[in-house]
Amino acid sequence: MQNAQRIRRRRSSGRTAQNIWRTSRLEDRTMLAADTAEVGEVATGQILDAVDAEQSFMNTATALILIDEQLADVDQLLQGVDADCEVILLSAEKDFVNQVTQILASRRDVQELHIVTHGSEGQIYLGQQVINQAALDAASNQIRQWIPALAVDADILLYGCNTGKGTAGLRFATKLSGLTGADVAASTNFTGNLVHSDWELELAIGHVDVASPFSATVRSEYQHTLDIVVNAWGSTGEEQMALVIDGVEVQSWTVNTTWQPFVYATNET
């Protein structure tokens, strides 16, 4: 937050509102944390599958919000989305880059691409997938396929906790900007509405001028953060791991010999 740019409002100037409110999903699954309701019951608009979404939104929505369907109280976020945004729930079981590529394949002139997932320094997460600079490098040819869908002044916004923090965060955001030609903003601290968290994206690569797609009510009432995820494994199954934030050990846990994600719930601190 110290010397970083703030995100400024643009949606009210020079843009024709699309006046649509729909959500789209990539498959018929529901994985909402601590909630057994169907997604269709919590959104006020129509939920489409990927094929219908491509046909219905081709060349229309200029603001897309891609949300990890496993986020806590994702239905609450959906309730407070700006009316001119299209919302698509990302499957934790499908490849992140493939999903975004599929979503953008039929679209043009996308001004805003909001990506709402968990994150940590220099990376975002979708299920057990770690999307860091190395992952961007590996998928660079595919990510460049996003360019035709993006407007010349498009912005990509990353809401994961600490994704833009430090050298790794700066390199990650810079790499994504270079591959897509878009300006990129990312959070350098906890994202949400609890202690030590906010909804500002403090790091900006290029000129990012976008209003939050979530209503002030949702931002003030959403009692979660986009937690830190640590991926670790051991050689004997008895290793002790420790998470240190700002020089303070905030939690420790034991890992076994298989790859496993550990989620540090920042809303408990």
Image: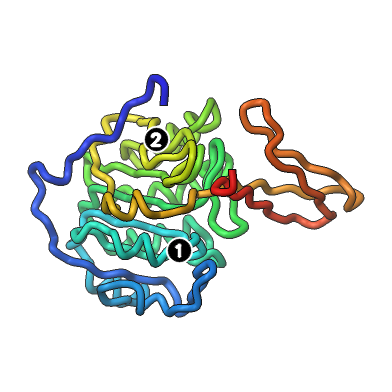
Residue kind at label 1, given as amino acid type: Asp
Residue 25 in sight: yes
User: SS class of the residue under badge 2?
Assistant: helix
Q: Which residue is depicted at the point 32% across and 76% down?
A: 47
Residue kind at label 2, given as amino acid type: Gly
Q: Which residue is depicted at the point 13% across and 60% down?
A: 18
Disc 2: CA contacts within 10 A as few (<14), some (14-19) or many (>=20):
some
Disc number at residue 73?
1
State the residue lying farthest toward the top: 3
In this rendering, which labeled residue sits more in front, label 2 or label 1?
1
Task: Give the labeled residue for mark 2.
Answer: 178
Q: Which one is in front, 244 or 146?
A: 244
Please tell me in which quadrant of the rendered image residue 250 appears.
top right
User: SS class of the residue under badge 1?
Assistant: loop
- In space, the residues marked 2 and 1 are separated at their CA atoms by 33 Å
Q: Which one is in front, 117 or 2?
A: 2
Which circle's residue, 2 or 1, is located before the other in the chain? 1
